[in-house]
Structure formats: structure tokens, C-alpha cells
Image (cartoon, rainbow, N blue to C red):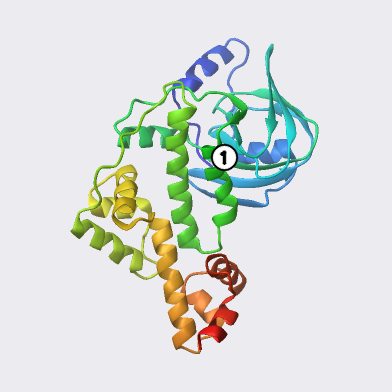
Amino acid sequence: MNKPIPHDPLKALLAASRLSSPAVELRPADLEMARILKTAPLQIASDPSNGGIAHWKHGALHDIVEPMTDHVIMAYPTGVQRLERRTGKSVAIGTARSGVVTTIPAGSSARWDIPGSVDVVQLYLPHTTLERVAREADAPAPGDLLERTGHPDPVTSGLLMSAADVLEGNAILDALFRQRLTDLLATRILAEHSGVPTAFEPITSGLAPHSLRRAIERLRSDRDADVSLAALASDAGLSRFHFCRAFKESTGLSPHAWLRQQRLERAMNMLRETDASIESVAKELGYASQTAFTAAFKKLTGDTPSNWRRRMR
């Protein structure tokens, strides 16, 4: 995913390793997890600047996780399972269950013993993302990420588990959702799981009217337009951190939720007022397939597009 990122938490590790070995190889988190879990993820989505999110179901594990380029944060949608992490003479024991998180700081290595199957959603978070969010929020530079093993944190757990439910087969919506989710999780990690806990000032105002108009115009534009958070924030002359908070203050919705609602309204208009096929409506709105569109439509309305069309005519 990303090249090795030099930052303070790794310097001590790298310096110590030179005494016993020529170098420490930092592995991409997704590849190291595939190696250690010996299976393929149910879902995985990533981009070069924000890391990735993957949903796994794997069996028992008794192996050493090698140092990785990114921080790994884990939440557990279902089930209960014992976790044991051993680093040198230090042993941490926890329980994988809903409402807890596990963190593996970038560059760290430990032996893991997990006696049975685990359902887990993992965030692969570059340290550069933590640094960017802290910088945009005028907060101190992030300290070392703390090792956590089954640590109670329902907020982070809930955010991360939502990733497995919201990816809906629409490239633009999914990318916008992942960008915002990663930033929210980075904010939470800085506040609760960093060696330098960070407090964030409450939002005080929304977007200026002209900035809100420009953001909405971009979100409503054709599906090949750049509607990334970076582009939206640049138009407003704000950082991603401040843009997202101001946009929600102005509209009551995140950019992803606003765009999803707008596309749902477009879908309803097409279904009600035209004879376009469900497949063509799905294609027009940027869904990868009719199946993906139908699932997303039903999640929001409680009905399939075809049934909804029959009722509205």
C-alpha cells in the first residue's frame, strides 16, 4: 500500500534493530495480514493516501506479526474470542467482542495466540494521516500509538464496524465514505489511543454561503467529477478536517450522507417519472451493478426499486 513512513515511533525500533540485524523490513499491512491470517478478506478497499479498510473472518492464529508500515486498528462485529499478544516478556490478554478495539502500532512486532475463529474489521492507518489530521486541527503532533488488546472503546468500534455495512458498490460514494471515516477514526485515535491525547475544539460555524453553494454544485456534478474531500475542501479554502465539520453544521449531514441522499432522490424521480430499467437507473447513478443499487436502495427505503416503482405509480 504505502512506502515505509519514517516517524518517531519507528526510530527507536530501527535503531535497536541495527544491533542485531542489518535492517527491519516494514511490510504493507494488507499483505502481512493476508500472510498471517492465511485467507482472503471478505471485503477490502484502499487508496494510496488514506490506507485501507478490510473485513476478515479467520481461524485460529499462533504466529508472529511482523512490523508493518501502517498502524492497524481492529474491531469485532460478532463473536467472542480470547486474544493473547506477547512482546518479549510482556503478555497482554484481552477478549475480541463487540465494543472493543485492538491496536498494533506501525513498526511493532508480537506473537499472537488466538485459539479460535474471529470476525474482524481492520483499518490500516498511515502515520501521515494522523499527522495531517492533527496539523489541520491545530493539535500537537501525534505521539506513539498505544498498544491495545481488546480495549473497551464502543465509539471507535462502532465507527470501524460501520465500514463493513456502508460500502455499497458505488465508487464515488464509497470513496467519499472511506475518506471521511478514516479522518473520523484518525481523530478518535488521536484523542484516545495516542501517547499524547488530543482535545478537539467544538465546531462554531458552518460554511459561508458561497462555499456551501460551490460544494453542493460539485457534489451534484457528473459522476466523473472530482468529489473527493480534498477537492471539496480546496474549493472552500479549508482543510479536510474543518470543511467536513462546517459542511455538517450547515446541512446536518456529512458530504457522503448528503450525496447519498441526493442520489436516492434522483433514483426515485427516475423510477417514478420514467420507464428507464432498473439496470439503467443503477448505471446512471454510478453503481457497479443492478444488484448493488437494489441493495443500497432497499437499505435506505426498506423496499426494492421495482416494488417502490409499482407503489408510486
Residue at horizontal 43 percent and vertical 66 percent from the top:
261
Q: Could you say which quadrant of the image residue 202 lies in?
A: top left
Quarter of the rendering occupied by the N terminus: top right
Residue at horizontal 61 percent and vertical 39 percent from the top:
75
Residue at horizontal 30 percent and vertical 44 percent from the top:
242
- Viewer-nearest residue: 53 or 109: 53
- Viewer-nearest residue: 33 or 23: 33
Total numbered circles: 1
Secondary structure under tag 1 reads helix
- Give the answer, above or below, for where 112 lies relative to 219: above
- Give the answer, above or below, for where 101 lies relative to 46: above
- Viewer-nearest residue: 32 or 260: 260
> What's the amino acid at mark 1?
Ser
Task: Indicate the position of residue 298 as horizontal and vertical percent values.
Answer: 58, 69
Task: Indicate the position of residue 235 as horizontal and vertical percent values.
Answer: 25, 55
Task: Indicate the position of residue 127 as horizontal and vertical percent values.
Answer: 46, 32
Q: Could you say which quadrant of the image residue 101 lies in?
A: top right
Residue at horizontal 48 percent and vertical 21 percent from the top:
9
Horizontally, residue 56 falls left or right of residue 230, namely right
Disc 1: CA contacts within 10 A as few (<14), some (14-19) or many (>=20)? many
Horizontally, residue 53 falls left or right of residue 196, namely right
Read off the residue under disc 1: 157
- Viewer-nearest residue: 8 or 143: 143
Task: Indicate the position of residue 178 as horizontal and vertical percent values.
Answer: 48, 50
